[in-house]
Amino acid sequence: MTNIQATQSEQFQDRFGRLVAARLSAGTAELSHDVAERLRAARVQAVARRRPASLRAATTVSNSGGAATLTFGDEGQSLWNRIASILPLVALVAGLFVIQVAQDERRAHEVAEVDAALLTDDLPPAAYADPGFIQFLKTGGE
Amino acid sequence: MATERELSDFLKSVEKRAFKRSIYHVRDEEAALDIVQDSMMKLAEHYGDKPLAELPMLFQRILSNCTLDWFRRQKTRNALFSNMSDFESSTDDGDFDLLETFTFAEGSQQAESAEDTTRRAQILRQIEAEIQELPGRQREAFLMRYWEDMDVAETAAAMGCSEGSVKTHCSRAVQALSKALKAKGIQL
C-alpha cells in the first residue's frame, strides 16, 4: 500500500468512525427518564464525595504530627539527639538492676545474722530438734 | 484544579456515553449503572482535585477498570460465566480495503418523516448490536477514539497500551463494523 492509499484509508476510517459516533450520540439522547435520573443522582453523590483540597491538606499535617510523636521526633535529628532520647529508658533499666542487687544483698545479710546468732549462742543448734527441749520451753523452763 | 462545578459539568457531559459503553460491554442495564456510579465516585474521591484537562483520560481508565472488576466479580460468582475472551484480540482479517466495501450516504439534510425516525432507530440498534459483537479491546479503542473524541496518545494512555496497538484495534474495529453494516445494507 502506498502512502497516498494509506492516508486515504485513514481518512475514510476517521470519517466512518465519526459517523458511527454521531449515530451513537444521537442514541444517548433517547435514554429513558429513569436511567437519566439515576445517572444524575449518581453524579450528585459523586460530587458530594469530593473532598475539598484544604481539608485534605489539614489531614496530612495532623498525620505527620502523629508520626513525629510516635517516633520521638527523630525526623532529621542528629545521632546525639537519638541517644539522648533513649537515655531515660537506659536509666530505668539500670535503676531496676541496682534495686534488685540491693534487695538480694539485704536478704543475705539478714539470713547471715540469724545464722550467726544461732551459732554463737550457748545453746547448741541440735537442741532445737529435741522434742523434750521444745516441751521444756512451752512449760516456761521450770 | 477542577472546581466542584467543573467536575459536575464534566461528569454530566460523559455520563450517558459512559453508561452506553458499559452496556455494550456488560449487556446489563443495572450493572452498567453500577459501573458508571462506581467510576464517578472513584474519580471524585481520588482525583477530584486534578486539573480539568486530566479528567477525561482518568475517567476512561477508571471506567475500564471498573468494567473489568465487574467481569472478575461475575467470574468469581459464577464459574460457568466467562466473557473475558472478549478482551482478547481477534484473528487477522487479511487484506481488506475499506474504500471498496463501504460508501457514505451523501446529502442527508432532508426533512425527517416518522418513517425516517423509525428507520434511524433501527439503524442505531443494529449499529449498537454490531458494536457489542466487537472484541472488547477493539470496542474500547474504537469508542474512546471516535466517540469520546480522544486522540491516539490519550486512548493509548487510558487503555494502557501502545499507540500502535490503538491504531490496529481501531482499524480492525472499523473494518469489522463497515463489513457488517454493509452486509445489512446500512449506509451512514
Image: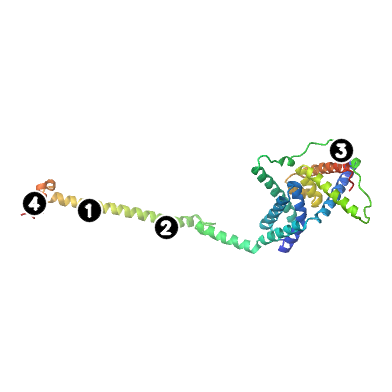
Q: Which residue is mark 4?
A: A136
Q: Chain of mark 1?
A: A
Q: Position of residue A124 (x, y in %)?
A: 11, 47
Packing grade of label 3 (10 A; few <14, some 14-19, many >=20) is: few
Q: Secondary structure at mark 4?
A: helix
Identify which amino acid the numbered label 3 is placed on: Phe
Identify which amino acid the numbered label 2 is placed on: Pro
Residue A132 relative to residue B57: left or right? left
Residue A31 relative to residue A101: left or right? right
Mark closer to the chain start, 1 or 2: 2
Residue at screen point 71% across, 51% down: B30
Residue B167 in view of the camera:
yes
Q: CA distance from mark 1 to mark 2?
A: 33 Å
Tags 1 and 3 in contact by the CB under 8 Å rule?
no
Q: CA distance from mark 3 to mark 2?
A: 82 Å
Q: CA distance from mark 3 to mark 4?
A: 128 Å
Q: Which residue is mark 2?
A: A88
